[in-house]
Image (tube, grey):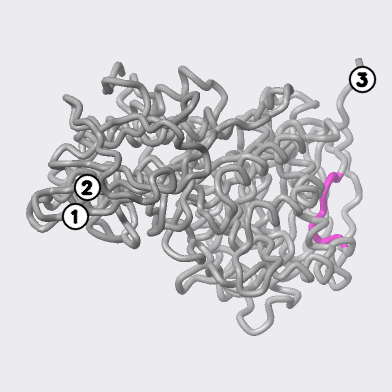
Amino acid sequence: MNETFSFKHEGMGAILYNGGVSFRVWAPYADQVFVTGDFNNWSQTAHPLTREDNGCWSGDIAGAKAGDRYKYLIWNSEQQLFRIDPCSKEVTCSNCNSVIYHPQFDWGTDPFQAPAWHEMVIYEMHVGTFNCTESGKPGNFMSAMAKLDYLQDLGVNAIEVMPAMEFRGSFSWGYNPALIYAIESDYGGPQAFKEFVKAAHARGMAVILDVVYNHFGPGDLDLWRFDGWSENDKGGIYFYNDGRSKTPWGDTRPDYGRPEIRQYIFNNAMMWLEEFHLDGLRWDATAFIRNVNGKDNDSEHDIAEGWSLMQWINEEIKKRHPGKISIAEDIRGNSFITKPVPEGGAGFDAQWDELYVRQIRAALTSPEDKAVNLESVKTAIEHRYDNKAFARVVYTESHDEVAEGKARLPQEVSPQDTGSWIAKKLSTLGAALVFTAPGIPMIFQGQEFLEDEWFHDKDPLDWPRKEMYAGVWQLYKDLIHLRRNQDGNTRGLCGSYVHVYHVNSNEKIMAFHRYTEQKAEDSVVIIVNLKHEESLDYLIGFPREGFWKVRFNSDANLYDSNFSNCICPDTVAEPVERDSQPCTGKVSLGPYSVLMLSQDVPSA
C-alpha cells in the first residue's frame, strides 16, 4: 500500500538543530499559535508560529535546547488553549509540560537479532508492578532492569512490556495513553526505556511493546479539542466527531480516515521500531480499530479505514523491518487478522488465541474430573489461524485473564489455598500445555512462582514467593529450556505440526505428537493425565519404534515435595500398532501431570 502524507518540512514536534529548535504542530482551526517555555521565560507572545499550507504551524527558536520545558498556546477565537505537544517524547507529567528531547543514544555496535517466532518465549511484564523498590511508588525501567538477569536465567527470550506511554497519574495498567509518543515519566522517560531495551538485548531478550491505537485517554487528554474545533460535542481534530467515536473506554476513537491522524499513528509505530530499537509491537484491542462495536459480521459498523491503517503499518513493518513481529489482541478468533495483506488480511504475524486460553482454563478449573472435556482440549491444542502454527500466542494467564473479577489460575483452582497440592498440580499442568502446544508461548509476570493476587496496578509482585515455590519456578525453567530445544533433543516443540492421536475421555488421558518432519531427531510425544489418580503401565501408541527417553515429568518431587513422584522409566516402543500409530509403548503418569518423551538424536 503506497500511502503517504507529506509535510512541507520534515518532522513534527520539537526538532533540534545546531543552535536552536524548530517547532511544528498541526492545528488547522487555530487563529494563532505561540510556543512558550523556559527559553522565553514562558512568554505568551514572544514566539508566534507561522501558518503553513497544510494546517501546521512552525517556527525556529534560536537558543532553545534539549531539556527545556515548553507548551503551545493556541488561540481559536476567544478560546485560549495551553497544549502539550502531541509529539512529545518526554513530558514532566501527563498534564504538565513537554520537554525538548535529544534522541541521541549509544546503542553500541552489536546488532541484536530477535529470536525466530517458532523459538520465541514471551514474558508479559507490567513495569509499574514488576519490581517495586520504593514504597508507595510504581516500579520503573531501572528497577525492572535489576531483574533482567533473573529473566535470562528463567530462559525467556522476549519481554512484552504493557503500555508504557504517558498516562494519567502514577499508577495505571497503561491502556489509557494521554500521549502515545511520550514514555511514562514515572517509569523514567525515554532514556530509561532505551537503557532497558539495550540491557535486555545484551542478555539475548527481545522487547515487544504493547501499543494502544483503538482509543486515547480519556484522562489528561490534551488532544481533546486540541485546537478548539469540534462537532457534535465530540473531540475535535484527532477523533471521530460522529458515532464512530464511541468506545468502551471513552468517546475517544482516533479518526483513522484523516490523513494527518493516520500519519500520526504510523509514525508512532515506526518510532518504536526504529528509534527505540524494539523488536515488535502488540496491538491492544484491534477489534475496536476495525469495528465500532468490536464485532465480526457487523458490516454496518465496520471501520474500513481502521482496517486499511493496520494493513498499511504491517506491510511497512515487513518491508522496513523483516523479522520484527506484529501481534494483535483481537480476541474474536478471526483468521483474517493474521492473513497476509495481499489476501485481504490485516497482515499481523500472530494474534492472542482466545480459544486456547478459554478451553484450557475451563479444563483446569473444572469442579470435577468427569466434567473435563478432552475434545475441547484437543481442539485448543490443534487450533491455528490461516493454517500457520505460529500465528497464535498461547497462554493460561495474561493481564486480562487475571484481573477485574478474574483470578490467577491457582486461585481459581483453589480459592482458599493457592499453595495447595491441587493448585500447584493444575497450574503446572497448564504451564506444560502452554509450552508444548504449537504457537508462541507466553506467561504473565509472577506466574512462574504462583503469584496468587489478582492483577491490579498497585499490587507489586511478591518476590519472596520465588523462594517459597522454588520447585515450581524450576519447572517453568525446565519447560522453557525444553521448548527452546536447548539440549537438542526436543526440536519437535519448535516444529509446525501436531497430531493429537490419543483421547481417552474415560481415563482423561490424551497424547499428541509434535514434529517438523517426523524424523527421530524432531519428534516429541506429550502425554497428559487430567485426572486426580495416577495411571500405571498405561499402553499408548508411539510414532516410531525404539528407545524413548522421558525428558520431563511434571509429577517429579523435584518440583514439589508433595508431588507423587510417579516414576515413569524410559520406554521401548515395540512395532505393534496402537492409536493409529505404528508402535506401542508403556508409560506411568502421576495425577494431573504431563510427560514429555523423545528419542536421542542420531549421531553423524
Earlier sequence position, callout 1 versus callout 3: 1
Residue 306 falls left or right of residue 319: left
Q: Position of residue 277 (x, y in %)?
A: 58, 31
- Above or below, 274 relative to 476: above
Instruction: Please provide percent x and percent y for residue 257.
Output: 19, 35
408 left or right, relative to 145: left
- Circles 1 and 2, Cβ within 8 Å, touching? The answer is yes
Residue 138 showing in the rendered view: yes
Q: In terms of sequence position, does the residue under pointer 1 or pointer 2 come before the other?
A: 2
**Does the magenta segment cover residue 185?**
no
Q: Quadrant of residue 497?
A: top right
Image coordinates for residue 319, horizontal then vertical, percent: 46, 17
Residue toward you, 438 or 4:
4
Residue at left offset 64%, top offset 78%: 414
User: Which quadrant of the structure image shows residue 397?
Assistant: bottom right
Residue 209 placement (x, y as % from top left): 53, 43
Numbered tag placed on residue 603 in the rendering: 3
Amino acid type for the residue under numbered disc 2: Ile
Give the magenta range: 550-556
Circle 2 is placed at which residue position?
74
How many numbered marks appear? 3
Work out whether residue 182 or residue 420 is closer to the camera in this orientation and state it: 182
Quadrant containing the N terminus is top left
Q: Quadrant of the C terminus?
A: top right
At x 56%, y 44%, the residue is 190
Residue 80's label in the rendered image is: 1
Q: Secondary structure at mark 1?
A: strand
Residue at figure coordinates x 45%, y 37% from the top left: 64
Give the Cα separation between the discs numbered 1 and 2: 6 Å
Q: Earlier in the sequence, mark 2 or mark 3?
A: 2
